[in-house]
Amino acid sequence: MIRVEDVVDRAGLEAAWRIRYEVFVVEQRVPVEEEVDALDTDPSTSHALAWLGDELVATGRVLGGHHPGEVHIGRVAVRRMARRRGVGAALMAHLEGVALARHGVPDGGDLAVRIVLSAQEQAMAFYTRLGYRVISGERYLDAGIWHQDMERRVRV
C-alpha cells in the first residue's frame, strides 16, 4: 500500500534529505552542495514523503512560483527498489494537490495552477504519462545530468 503525507516537522525534512542523498548524491553522483539548498527550509516550500508499506521510499517538494498560480515541483526522488510500483505517480498526485490548494488561482470558475518542473531526460516518459509536456525542447545540464523543462496545468 502506498501512503503519501506532508512533511510537518524537522524530522520529516531530515527523512526527505536522506532519500534525496541516497538517490541524487549516491546513485546519480550529484555533488551534495548542489543537492541541498536554502529553499528546503523556506516557509513557503512544501515537502511530502511517500511510503510503500512501512518503508519510506520517496520525497518531493513544491516551491511557489514567481507568478500567482504557478509553482515548481522538484527534488522528486524515489528509491530504486520502489520504482515502477506506482509510488512516483502517487507522490506527484499529492504534490499537485498541494500546489493547487496552496497556490491555485481562480480561472473561469475553477481553481487552477501551472506546474513547472525540470525533468531529468531519463524521467521524461514518466512525466509525460502524468500529463506533463515539454515547454521548449531545450536541454540543459544540471549537476551533470541532462534536463528539459516540462509543465502541466491542473484545475478543479
Image (cartoon, rainbow, N blue to C red):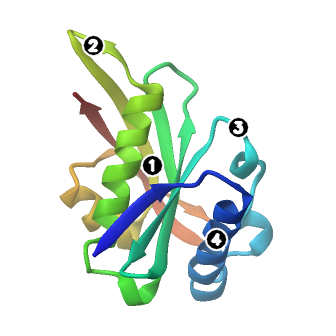
Q: Earlier in the sequence, mark 1 or mark 2?
A: 2
Badge 1: residue crowd in 10 Å (few <14, some 14–19, many ≥20): many
Instruction: Residue lying at the far front in this picture: please name it.
Output: 54
Q: In front: mark 1 or mark 3?
A: 3
Q: Compute the Cα span from label 4 to label 1.
A: 22 Å
Badge 3: residue crowd in 10 Å (few <14, some 14–19, many ≥20): few
Give SS at disc 1: strand
Q: Compute the Cα span from label 4 to label 3.
A: 18 Å
Image side of residue 70 versus residue 156, left or right: right
- Which residue shows up at 45% across the image and 49% down it? 117
Q: Which residue is mark 4?
A: 15
Name the quadrant of the C terminus. Answer: top left
Kindly check if marks 4 and 1 are in contact, taking CB atoms under 8 A apart as contact: no
Q: Nearer the viewer, residue 46 or 69?
A: 46
Q: Earlier in the sequence, mark 4 or mark 2?
A: 4
Q: Which residue is mark 2?
A: 107
Quadrant hosting residue 52: bottom left
Amino acid type for the residue under numbered disc 4: Ala
Whether 46 is drawn above or below 48: the answer is: above
Q: Which residue is mark 3?
A: 43
